[in-house]
Image (spheres, grey):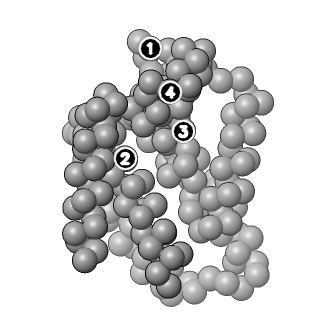
Amino acid sequence: MLLLLVTFIYKLSLILLRRYNCGIFHQTNFEFLKEKYADKNTGDVNIPEIWLFIIGAVIAAFAISIGMGGAMFLTPLLVGVLGADIKKAISLGLFFVIFSSFGGFVSISYNGLIDYKIGAILSVGELVGVYFGTLAHHKIEKHKQKLALMGLNIITFSLVMRSIFLS
């Protein structure tokens, strides 16, 4: 059943991305933000520093409260809303996660809520995944990265909705 749901969501994301030219918020009222803050030639996002601070604080507060590092929120925001280059947005999201995750870890660890043995085992596996993910990041086309990002977000959303309404 889960495999059928994942397949359906993947196919739906492909249809939506093809229809909307691979932009999560393409042809919406966010176009003015893309025009104002994104350099179309380089994909750089030029946002005032105070807004970057506010975006970082809001995303970190929300992401850490539900056990995430924040890149899952930051990357679609940078790509879909602000028009950043997908490869630069992914890199920035990973940089962001270092600090938000460390801060969340220290706080949650202080309250005694971390199982260090399980965390260590997961971390070793994560290092292997990071190595292969970094290799893939450099080889995968931007279009396919956008498809993967959209598919992952849809799958995650569906699994959360399933756990809320079917538990």
The three-letter code of the residue at mark 3 reads Leu
Secondary structure under tag 1 reads: loop
Residue highlighted by disc 3: 77
Residue highlighted by disc 1: 40
Say whether residue 18 is left or right of residue 127.
Answer: left
x, y percent for residue 127: 38, 64
x, y percent for residue 133: 31, 53
Residue highlighted by disc 2: 150
Residue highlighted by disc 4: 28
Secondary structure under tag 4 reads: loop
What mark, if any, has residue 7 been given in the picture? none
Tell which circle, 3 or 4, labels the residue nearer the N-terminal end. Answer: 4
10 Å crowding of disc 3: few (<14), some (14-19), many (20+): some
Q: Give me the C-alpha separation between circle 4 and circle 1.
A: 17 Å
Task: Give the camera-side residue of 22 and 149.
Answer: 22
Against 147, residue 10 (above or below) is below
x, y percent for residue 118: 48, 85
